[in-house]
Image (cartoon, rainbow, N blue to C red):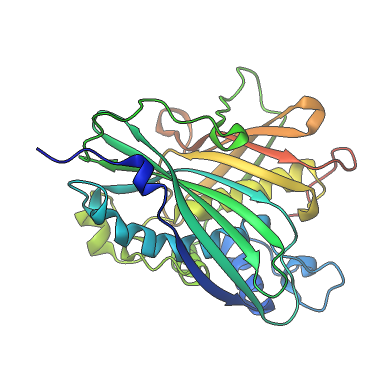
Amino acid sequence: MAPPIDLEAIKQMSWTITTTYTPSTIIIYALALGVKGTDLAHCFEAHPDFSAPPTFGAIPVIAIMGPVTRSMPSFLPNFQPHNHVHGEHYLELKSPFPACGTTTLTTTAKILDIVDRRSGVTVAVGITTVDASTGLQICYNEWTSFIKSVPGAGLSTKPNPRGAATATHPAPKRAPDAVLSHKTSPEQSALYRAASGDLNPLHIDPAVAKRGGFPGPLLTGTCTLGMGVLHVIGAFAHGDFGRFKNVKVRLSGPVFPGEVVRTEMWREDGGRRVVYRQVVGEGKAERVVISQAAVELNAGDSVGESRL
């Protein structure tokens, strides 16, 4: 019998990494999400409004989840890497990403919660990223993984409430207030893989994808997340990245390069919150790839036309 998971001891663990980026990193990441090359505010470093997409904060998160995941066999009985799935994500932007020169970030991760899900456990990792030169906090993420076949006896069967980070947002039973679509390119998975640093071969190698039970390579979940945030900001914030406050999603299914991703959006709370879901396919072939999702927006102008 596997030893019980000592959650309190695990919460004392932490991981820290340092990463750097430049305006070129921002541009490549934006293009990998599907931002148009003609959108100079997000693709030209000399534009006066040049800025990083809010989900640029996923890059240091992806980097630190490598050492976190490699440590999991030391505290999760029966852990196997192939049973590890990115299930939910929360990202809150605290301050804009510096967008000139070379910026160094320090990112620290800690285990927040482990929940018994009967067939395995979910592990919530809290991740804080700061500007290494100033100490200013840039963003906070929570990456929640579902890990099959890990025994959770003795653990809670419900997550510890953490406000917006653990909220769920079912899609309303009415027509969406806005719908935007993005046709992924055949190269998008490979491009996002390189831009984000997520070098899992599942996102590029057909043989690895087939061994995992998929018909071919699939997009990284944070790529689908990033596309959805772009759609929400485009539809409800005039494309202004500065309006973004936070996003919470459940990653419900894969997207394959070449598929059209449709983001269906509903305004709530006077437009300060946008509930959304992302789907691919039509009719009986439709499948949800992002669910229980919402973006909170900072105060600003009323809804306008998308410029994305």
In front here: 65 or 217? 65
Counting from the top left corner in percent of width and height, residue 116 is at: 31, 31
Q: Is residue 137 left or right of residue 9?
A: right
Let me know if residue 57 appears in the view: yes
- Above/below status of 199 relative to 81: below
Looking at the rendering, in which quadrant would you find the C terminus? Answer: bottom right
Q: Residue at x 76, y 77 (%)?
A: 45
Residue occupying the far right of the picture: 301
In front here: 260 or 55? 55
Counting from the top left corner in percent of width and height, residue 56 is at: 62, 61
In front here: 144 or 229? 144
Let me know if residue 280 appears in the view: no
Looking at the rendering, in which quadrant would you find the N terminus? Answer: top left
Residue occupying the far top of the picture: 173
Q: Residue at x 44, y 30 (%)?
A: 159
Residue 38 picture quarter:
bottom right
Q: Is residue 202 left or right of residue 96?
A: left
Q: Residue at x 67, y 56 (%)?
A: 54
Counting from the top left corner in percent of width and height, residue 27 is at: 66, 72
Counting from the top left corner in percent of width and height, residue 22 is at: 66, 79
